[in-house]
Image (cartoon, helix red, strand yellow):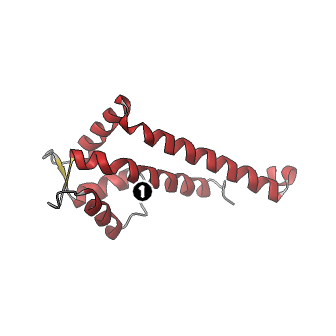
Amino acid sequence: MAKTILGEDELNKVRAKAISLHSDVIKSFVETADSSFGQRALVDMFKVADKNGDGKLDNDEVREALHSLGFSWLKEKQVAGILRRADQDKNGVIDYQEFVSEAPKTLKTNLVKLAKKNGGELGFLV
């Protein structure tokens, strides 16, 4: 119906604007990582991801955490790359400080992808 009223070109412009605004909201949310709210969210995320409670995230814990957030497109190679990038001391795991440094970048990139994926599934990107 919107296509009939607006026409295809105008509808595509409206969709693009909505997607752009939504992406901006996601990016702004992720930028709160340095606030007290953001720090608390990161603590909670780390605790949930740290399944064995050893204070470190291994490859399996990172993959499971990312997939539980809906980032199903991340394959083993990409998860390993995230772990490698975050693992500043190169000990094969991510401690809390390394997590805090990496999480905002990974979240920003993948939350935008998730929004686009969901928008496509809902027909917003048709």
Report which quarter residue 37 is drawn in.
top left
Q: Which residue in the protein does label 1 denote?
A: 71
Tell me the element at label 1: loop
Left or right of 45 in this view: 12? right
9 w.r.t. 39: above or below: below
Q: Point out the residue furthest to the top here.
A: 36
For image coordinates 54% across by 51% down, the residue present is 115
For image coordinates 27% across by 48% down, the residue present is 99
Packing grade of label 1 (10 A; few <14, some 14-19, many >=20) is: some
Q: Can you give x and y, in whole percent of width and height, for residue 89 in the image?
A: 17, 57
For image coordinates 62% across by 44% down, the residue present is 21
For image coordinates 28% across by 65% down, the residue present is 80
Of residue 17 and residue 114, the one placed in the foreground of this image is 17
Left or right of 39 in this view: 58? left
Q: Can you give x and y, in whole percent of width and height, for residue 5 in the image?
A: 87, 49
Of residue 123 and residue 39, the one placed in the foreground of this image is 39
Name the residue type under label 1. Answer: Phe
Q: Can you give x and y, in whole percent of width and height, for residue 119 in the image?
A: 60, 53
Q: How many marks?
A: 1
Quadrant containing the C terminus in the rendered view: bottom right
Of residue 53 and residue 14, the one placed in the foreground of this image is 14
31 w.r.t. 116: above or below: above
Report which quarter residue 39 is drawn in.
top left
